[in-house]
Amino acid sequence: MASTDTATGTNAGAERIAAAFANKAGRAALMPYLMGGFPDVETSRAIGLAYADGGADLVELGVPYSDPLADGPVIHEAGTKALAAGATVDDVLDICGTLAERLPVVLMCYANLVLARGVDTFVGTAVDAGASGLIVPDLPLEEAPEILAACDAAGLALVPLVAPTTPDERLRAIGTRARGFLYTVSVAGTTGERAGSRESFAPILERARAATSVPVALGFGIATPDAAAAAADAGADGVIVGSRLVREAAEAADPPAAVRAVVTDLAAALRT
């Protein structure tokens, strides 16, 4: 199991994430989202590998959950179908192990799934599976210390989220505790495809960057190469694309080939 070096304060997961941001091929790191187990376990594994082939720098790997409060209708439906098909946490961790051989994997998992196994057990299992980071979208700042301590001890980067509506003082408190990167939500609300521009992204990113020393990645609503490029131009260190890719996987006859094409276009936009 990886761990934090108490003498130097280094964190293996955070270091791998930092390297991915530092070594990005373009203006911002590309982090596509994958719903683990959708449309089935093996196809989702192939989709994740297609992300890597298409030029992704990291992958956000979602664990399906019955009450995903942060997810919009596309990702919510994908999670529901993954659960109906029998996908489990262990299945997703197995996918994580495959993808981690290619690029850093950041798990996105709701708090109940972490607590159900026990914090130390879940974090240790995630690290053993090759995960570099963990996002828990329904974990508020005040309830984060136990999971943060376990992640720090095991070498897993606990990545917090901030929103456009997060007050400045709270934003600074979250930013100082961020590991790996600060997940910055572009709009108030849930995930989904929306229009966005450099002008709308810039103020959000400016506030986030002022509150933290780690890279800032922008997500929620980014769906097109133009929007990804706008986020990079506005100052994002990373761009997260979810619903657009999950929708592509749901509609395509050959999901891995289809999502690879979309990821390739997104990566090209970030390199231009």
Image: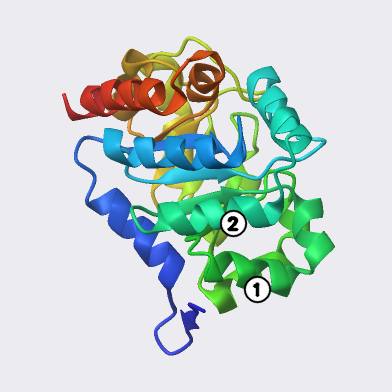
Badge 1 is on which residue? 150
The dot on residue 93 is: 2
Mark 1: give few (<14), some (14-19) or many (20+) Cα within 10 Å.
some
Is residue 1 or residue 256 the one in the foreground? 256
Of 159 and 176, nearer the camera is 159
SS at circle 1: helix
Q: Position of residue 231 (x, y in %)?
A: 36, 25
Q: Is residue 95 visible?
A: yes
Residue 243 in the image: above or below residue 212: above
Q: Most extreme residue toward the bottom, as rendered?
A: 7
Taking the spot 35% from the left edge, 52% from the top edge, the residue there is 103
Residue 217, given in percent of the width and then of the height, sits at 43, 39
Which residue sits at x=42%, y=71%? 12
Mark number displayed over residue 35: none
Residue 228 vs residue 209, the one in the foreground: 228
Q: Quadrant of residue 49?
A: top left
- In the image, what residue type sits under mark 2? Leu
